[in-house]
RNA sequence: GCUCCGAUGGUGUAGUCCGGCCAAGCAUACCGGCCUUUCAAGCCGGCGACCCGGGUCCGAAUCCCGGUCGGAGCACCA
């Protein structure tokens, strides 16, 4: 059967400014854990533009803070991106580029654009807040360079020396005044071990790499606006061509833990089974529940990249996903909190219900129903029928309540508006559990032919459920 | 406090750069209808918005000024 093509207005991302031929863009997650739904936005937006204009999409793993790295992320992030349909053309890891950063720093130091500062953290913060230069700011470039080499060699401890980018000590925005470009860390880096203890800060390595990689366009959140200005000093000092920047507004996603460190803690404490726990919104977890990658793409394209902040809408996201999964979702009856009822003196029959009302080629669900059958219906429905009341067992027949049992109704007419239509399961149905993302479990009975259903099913009058794991994972209504 | 940004219905957006085709489009939610069969699907229909005040102009959601409200940044995180 032909599905009527639904008229959906095509949302289109605005054009990028200043495109000359191909574009080079990047994704720059920190490997502190697998990607979650929040990351999927920047990934898809960048991917869309590279696909529109042609060019390169570079995955740059930003691991210059050894204290916040999970080795698993290095392998999982590419998998997450692949599942989302994001086409990476090149992957680089910042921790393997230390020599490059050091070299750039030395040049900046020698040209007097950076200095090594030995003020303690408190003092550094205070003088900068007041817009006062510390004595180290005017030290000799050659001396700065030699101190920096000592930092590389690990001759200073954490906190006793930092390398600072000279900007404008009286800049109206205090955070832009002489910002820290390198600091010492005692931590052992999971990828490069403990041989290196001098690390660039994000603003330094990002600026250097954005240039070296030849980025033409950078789209990132508004939270990076002041970083863009900080980074512009490096471009200026080196006389580098500045990429085109665009900052999009922050989207807050309700009921989602965005902090990877919090998730990791929950995994360690066994609150979550792992990164793909149904209570989580990592790409892994959402994939497992049954969301389709097209949903992510469509949602983020429709959201666009306005400078305005917004709230993520699960209603809209789920509605889009429903459109993606419904055509392949076989229907099944799932009876929660089941009550077994006997139907007396019924007309023996074979129930015959399509797996999908609009796709008859998917076949029928057939069950032999005898003369005095016992079946299951939801307790809620059972309790709402008064003695003598009538209910329609969906796709079967009408029954009338008689005390605690039911009798077959001679009158089989009904109206979907006036008669209660209820899903049911035959006696040989199985126990079944559905895990919900709020951590609760719905227990009930599922019809035997569930064994023929893989992937996502629509449990009629209940919701969409992913059956892949042998038990149910609730997707959405 | 300082720096910067934004403001279209319940929610998400289109339109704003280059003022008229916008008495504002789409989606979702909601409401109603349809359907011998999903009181959470499907189809059809309906309700619902340009933050406020001035200005420019024949004409403003769109341009200018002021106000209000909201947000982001102000780390030896990214």
Image (cartoon, coloured by chain):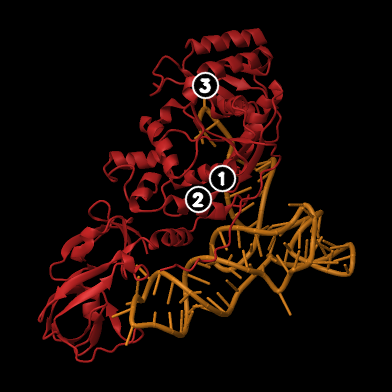
Chain colours: A red, B orange
Residue at 11% x, 86% y: name it: A345
State how far apart marks 2 and 1 are (Cα). 9 Å
Q: Position of residue A344 (x, y in %)?
A: 11, 84
Determine which quarter of the picture holds residue A67: top left
Q: SS class of the residue under badge 3?
A: strand
Which residue is tagged 1?
A48
Q: Which mark is residue A411?
A: none
Label 2 packing within 10 angstroms: few (<14), some (14-19), many (20+): many
Q: Position of residue A199 (x, y in %)?
A: 50, 21
State how far apart marks 2 and 3 are (Cα). 38 Å
Residue at 23% x, 74% y: name it: A352
Query: N-terminal of the two: label 2 or label 3?
Result: 3
User: In this rendering, would A66 be left or right of B49?
Assistant: left
Query: N-terminal of the two: label 2 or label 1?
Result: 1
Determine which quarter of the picture holds residue A35: top left
Q: Which mark is residue A297?
A: 2
Q: SS class of the residue under badge 1?
A: helix
Chain at numbered mark 1: A
């Amino acid at each position: 059967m032909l599905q009527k093509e639904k008229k959906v207005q095509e949302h289109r991302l605005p054009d990028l400014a200043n495109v000359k031929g191909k574009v080079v863009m990047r994704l720059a997650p920190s490997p502190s854990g697998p990607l979650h739904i929040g990351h999927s936005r920047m990934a898809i937006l960048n991917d869309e533009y590279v696909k529109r204009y042609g060019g390169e999409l570079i995955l740059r793993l930003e691991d210059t803070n050894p204290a916040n790295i999970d080795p698993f992320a290095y392998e999982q992030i590419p998998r997450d991106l692949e599942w989302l349909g994001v086409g990476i053309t090149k992957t680089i890891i910042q921790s393997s580029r230390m020599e490059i950063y050091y070299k750039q720093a030395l040049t900046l130091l020698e040209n007097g654009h950076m200095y090594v500062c030995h003020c303690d953290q408190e003092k550094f913060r205070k003088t900068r807040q007041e817009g006062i230069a510390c004595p180290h700011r005017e030290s000799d470039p050659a001396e700065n360079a030699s101190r920096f080499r000592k930092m590389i060699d690990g001759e200073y401890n954490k906190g006793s020396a930092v390398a600072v980018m000279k900007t404008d000590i009286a800049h109206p925005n205090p955070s832009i005044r002489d910002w820290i470009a390198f600091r010492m860390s005692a931590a052992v880096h999971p990828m490069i071990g403990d041989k290196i203890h001098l690390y660039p800060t994000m603003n330094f390595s990002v600026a250097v790499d954005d240039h070296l990689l030849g980025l033409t366009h950078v789209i990132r959140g508004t939270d990076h606006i002041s970083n863009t200005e900080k980074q512009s000093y490096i471009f200026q000092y080196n006389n580098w061509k500045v990429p085109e920047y665009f900052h999009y507004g922050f989207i807050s996603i309700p009921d989602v833990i965005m902090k990877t460190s919090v998730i990791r803690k929950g995994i360690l404490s066994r609150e979550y089974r792992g990164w793909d726990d149904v209570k989580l919104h990592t790409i892994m977890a959402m994939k497992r529940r049954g969301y389709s990658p097209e949903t992510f793409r469509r949602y983020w394209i429709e959201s666009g990249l306005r400078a305005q902040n917004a709230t993520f809408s699960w209603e809209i996201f789920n509605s889009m996903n429903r459109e993606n999964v419904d055509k392949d979702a076989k229907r099944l009856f799932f009876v929660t909190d089941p009550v077994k009822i006997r139907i007396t003196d019924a007309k023996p029959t074979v129930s015959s219900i399509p797996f999908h009302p609009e796709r008859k080629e998917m076949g029928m669900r057939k069950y032999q129903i005898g003369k005095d059958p016992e079946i299951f219906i939801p307790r809620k429905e059972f309790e709402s029928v008064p003695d003598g009341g009538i209910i329609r067992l969906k796709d079967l027949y009408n029954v009338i309540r008689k005390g605690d049992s039911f009798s077959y109704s001679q009158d089989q007419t009904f109206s979907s508006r006036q008669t209660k239509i209820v899903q049911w399961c035959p006696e040989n149905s199985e126990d079944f559990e559905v895990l919900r993302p709020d951590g609760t479990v719905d227990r009930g009975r599922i019809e035997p032919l569930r064994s023929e259903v893989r992937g996502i099913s629509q449990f009629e009058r209940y919701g969409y459920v992913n059956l892949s794991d042998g038990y149910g994972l609730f997707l959405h209504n």
